[in-house]
Image: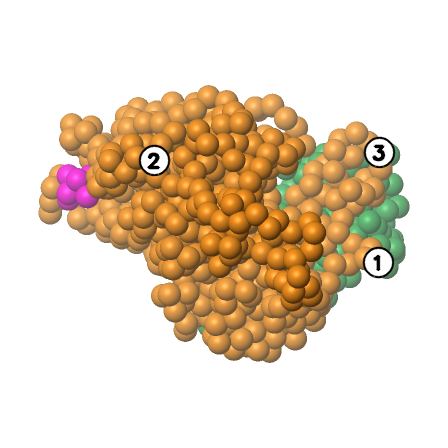
Chain colours: A orange, B green
Amino acid sequence: MSSLKQPARRRDFLLGSAAGAASLMVGAAAAAETVAAAAAPTPPATTPTDTSARVELYGTEHPGADFMVDVLKTLDFEYVCANPGSSFRALHESLVNYGGNRQPELLTCCHEESSVAMAHGYAKIEGKPLLVMAHGTVGLQHASMAIYNAYADRVPVYILLGNIQDATWRRGDVEWAHSVQDAAAMVRDYVKWDDNPVSLAHFAESAVRAYKVALTPPYEPVVLVADAVLQEEPMSEQDRLGARIPKLTIPTPPAGDSAAVAEAARLLVNAQHPLIICGRSARTPAGIDLVVQLAEALQAPVQDRHFRMNFPTRHPLAGGSVADADLILALEVNDLWMATHTQTPVNRLGMESQSVMQRGAKVISIHSGDLYGKSNYQDFGRYSEVDLSIAADAEATLPALIEACRRLIGSRRTGALNARGAQLAAASRRRRADDVELAAAGWDASPISTARVSMELWNQIQHEDWSLVSETVPFFSGWPLRLWDMSRSYHYLGGHGGYGVGYGAPAAVGAALANRKHGRLTVNIQCDGDLNYAPAVLWTAAHHRIPILNIMHNNRAYHQELMYLTDMAARSNRGIDTARIGTGLYDPNIDYATLAKAYGVFSIGPISDAADLGPAIKRAIAVVKRGEPALIDVVTQPR
Amino acid sequence: MRRLRLIALGLLLAGVAGAQEPAGDPRAGEARYLAVGCYECHGTVGQGGSGMRVSPLPLPWVGFELYVRRPAGQMPAFSDKVLSAASLADIYAYLQSLPRERKANEIALLQELGSK
């Protein structure tokens, strides 16, 4: 301890004689003295006998981290996800001891990618951020892909990043290697805002600002650096006098300009075949009902791109076709080009796609993405030509748009609208009947068909308050979306955002964490390749008693890449039977039930006979209802 | 729509195709179907997935061969250099040998869905 003495700095030295401070001594020095005293009543020659010798005791009763915790508590975080790291050790200690490990409660994560993805999944259920703590350089490097996913998925995640900014406070090579001049720089391209406070007063203001920025549409991740010296040292006199915690006020989301909304309503009401396309339009649970109201007022079909749960899957107006539409209303659609164009075949790069829209068809876009953008990462997609572009939050704009449409429709055209609605409902029924018939194909196959898995699950959860927290398009051929009755915001959450594999398992656990207090039965259809990135999140679920039913989609491959490799080989006219090299996950087959068991998770499998699946799901649900995670390893068809 | 076009093509070709259907080996065909990756998109029993359902086959032999060699849409072309005529005939025989699938109304878990 004494070697750290640097009197010019704000350290709270407790100085005193060896005898006087004995009760406060800790660590190796204290232990050594105790042993020496017991073994040798007479002090050995090397023991200091000069009572005037001074020992420095290094203590800080009220480190700056306590104030940081005070700030964070005002932001009402329920949990903080972290893999422990020395650059935020004081904050860690303060959260647990000073903060009482409540609001937020610390969750032990085994990888920063898991921490962030858990926060990603949690936010999509709860509508607000989790706190994530990450360590200096290496922790943020681990976290970065998950941050990119959250960024591309327009999800608020709040990251506190430990760092030792002042070089003279770094000790050995580890602290030098883990410190950085501009800590948030490596993720600045895909967070909405970051700051590096140099005082506790600065920290308080930036902490509140970061929360506000994250929760202003479009939602995005933010990073706030918590300097280690600020955390560990006592508040400076300047901070004592000046620090206060500002009031948080979340801005109302931007609604569309009234003239533009009136024009949109006019176009919609006058269209013969309007189509509504939803990307991430349901920003809150209320968003689903708003789209339903608009669709029913117009008797217009709704094509859900499934980046969120935007529209009930069994609503008679679910469906529609871009090719049939003379007017498209795109609500928070980031990939409007893809929604309106054919795709280039997967084995060819280049944009050969053609518009599938009718000649003369018009497009209205309401998109909060128009209010915000970055350059380097290209998730914004191809530029889409539209006729009316409303830079606003779709959910905030819909009430005015619905009202304007209703006013224009009045009692006129009711017969025509009803006829259109009846046609759409009939088309919806036919499509659904086709899906049910397709689900029967391969019903008894082994490996088990993804449709069969979906129906065995649905059979046992449909009467529960359930939440499917995994992406099923394209990995599971979208079967739950095609077969299940989904109508609530938590019935489906969409996917990665940035398509960074490794999102699925931790995001599912994060969503399950949010569902826990609502008593929902969380179901995760878990891709095998995804789980292998950071499987220890299963331990986090077990350790923190997060109930979740994991159904392995074990197709024993990175299947998308396997298909690409077959495509590439066929295109090159050679070796089409070598595609599994580098893409297969077999020889040996991975035993996910044993993996789960090692992490303390109840497990069953592998199951290859479809007849065994129903009973296994029943047993696993009983475990989940006790408040624990469970996993069933199901050997499945590719898609 | 693509499937309808395929069926139309098949029907067109059926008139000239019947006599030319080769005698393939279903067991060898199953092995080739799995080895060369047909199952990746169409499922191990042709039930479909990323690709369309191919059991029961919507095409007669000539249409099937033509489509594998010169497909439309997302499917890659499999030339005779990587997939011999004999292998293709075996795969065709395998798909034709697959038993008739049960209909949805013959499956308890799907009956309920069909009524909603």
User: Residue at 55% across / 66% down in the picture?
Assistant: A542
Q: Position of residue A595 (x, y in %)?
A: 69, 63
Question: Image height check: is B25 above or below B36?
Answer: below
Give the residue type at disc 1: Pro
Secondary structure of the residue carrying tag 3 is: loop
The residue wearing badge 3 is: A574
Query: Which quadrant is home to the N terminus of chain A?
Result: top right
Cβ–Cβ below 8 Å for labels 2 and 1?
A: no
Does residue A339 appear to the left or right of A353 in the view shown? left
Mark 3 to mark 1 CA distance (whole Å): 24 Å
Does residue A378 appear to the left or right of A73 in the view shown? right
In the image, A493 versus A532, the foreground residue is A532
User: Is residue A401 part of the magenta span, yes or no?
Assistant: yes
User: Numbered disc 3: what chain?
Assistant: A
User: Residue at 41% across / 35% down in the picture?
Assistant: A10
User: What is the number of the mark on residue B106?
Assistant: none
Secondary structure of the residue carrying tag 2 is: loop
Segment tinted magenta in the rendering? A397-406
Q: Position of residue A50 (x, y in %)?
A: 57, 47
User: Is residue A438 part of the magenta span, yes or no?
Assistant: no
Q: Position of residue A399 (x, y in %)?
A: 19, 43
The residue wearing badge 1 is: B26
